[in-house]
Image (cartoon, helix red, strand yellow):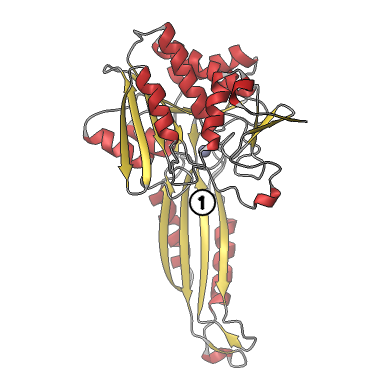
Amino acid sequence: MKESTANSDLKDPTTDLLCDLIRRASVTPDDAGCQSLLIERLERMGFACETLQFEDVTNLWARRGTDGPVLCLAGHTDVVPPGDLSGWNTDPFEPTLIDGLLYGRGAADMKSGIAAMVTAIERFVAACPDHDGSIAMLITSDEEGPARNGTLKVVEHLKERGESIDWCVLGEPSSHERLGDVIRIGRRGSLSGMLTVNGIQGHVAYPQSADNPIQRFAPVLHALYDIEWDQGNDYFPPTSFQFVELKAGIGAPNVTPGELYARFNFRYSTEWTHESLQQKVESVLDAHDIDYELRWHLSGEPFLTKPGRLIDAVSAVVLEETGIETEQSTGGGTSDGRFISPAGADVVELGPVNKSIHKINEHIAITDVPQLSTMYEKILKRMLG
Ligand SMILES: [Zn+2]
């Protein structure tokens, strides 16, 4: 059964706002007017709103109050491209309700989180206009892309003028099966290596006058996969190491290659830093008889929020709202928490079920939308009420 999604039919202010956001086709880094919609709502509540444009990325820093502590609700307005449109049952940028599920790009990642934050703040401020400390929102239009001009730059900008965040709730889709069953209290680090092994190209029939980098690389591959990097710790799963790309050869059956290219990635726990991982890999390479070049790319160090008031408040609210003892996880990919946490903030991620994110026919259960807003409102009450 297909139902109308005319905003007036849904009768829930959070769902209304979510639909308005989905209609703005904000594929990274285009904000498509999402943030001006938020600014309108936030300014009405007495927020000071600053648009921070860094190259083609639009960011928003909004704050209500001048005192500490600062509780920041954070997220991104950008979405990944819809992909093959013929695979979608509905228009990805026209929110459509079918059998209790609201479909649209960004429905779960993470326009519902943002809509829920805004309406949660509206109710909280109406009930508690003289709240403790400050409420802030940090919103970027590039979390899904290179993320160089988004949250990272905003945090740097705040630091330069001595402004800081004490607690941060990110609305990323943390939940697994049911809303609230998983919150993220940290994330693994991500480090990539790009390795070139040099050899000498030659005729396949005369291997003695060539130097085949494939043959030289094979034991290195084994040695790296044989390492148990760690067993994880109380907060993190074991570090994972994977090769993701391997290239050699010129496409001719009678030529041995002169060069081999391999790319690998670590998702690593707090047992390592990017420096210690690099040293370890380089020591393995140096122990083998290869001529190589290695370039590194660090996407983010791991971060972890230790037990304390914020985790307690978020867990208690989930329990109160859903009856679920939430799982405190550090799994999944990276998030903008990697930029906010190193500046000294406690970061917790609580958001929708993540099963359909980045997929064709992304959706959210319609009943989760107002419930998520209630959760954020209760967190505000516990931290600043
Ligand atoms: Zn996201």
Residue 365, position in %: x, y? 67, 27
Tell me where residue 125 sits by quadrant.
top left
Q: Is residue 231 visible?
A: yes
Residue with the mark numbered 1: 266
Q: Is mark 1 within 8 Å of ligand 1?
A: no
Q: Nearer the viewer, residue 163 or 211?
A: 163
162 relative to 133 in the view: left or right: left
Q: Determine the secondary structure under disc 1.
A: strand
Q: Is residue 235 visible?
A: no
Is 334 located above or below residue 100 in the figure?
below
Q: Nearer the viewer, residue 97 or 269?
A: 97
Residue found at x 52% / y 91%: 209
The image quadrant where one finds the C terminus is top left
Residue 41, position in %: x, y? 41, 22
Residue found at x 66% / y 45%: 360
Tell me where residue 202 sits by quadrant.
bottom right
101 relative to 250 in the view: left or right: right
Structural crowding at the residue carrying mark 1, measured as other residues with C-alpha within 10 Å and reported as few (<14), some (14–19) or many (≥20): many
Residue 278, position in %: x, y? 42, 55
Residue found at x 52% / y 84%: 211
Q: Nearer the viewer, residue 278 or 163?
A: 163
Residue 56, position in %: x, y? 36, 48
Amino acid carrying mark 1 in the image: Phe
Tell me where residue 315 sits by quadrant.
top right
Is 317 located above or below residue 233 in the figure?
above
Is 137 located above or below residue 228 in the figure?
above
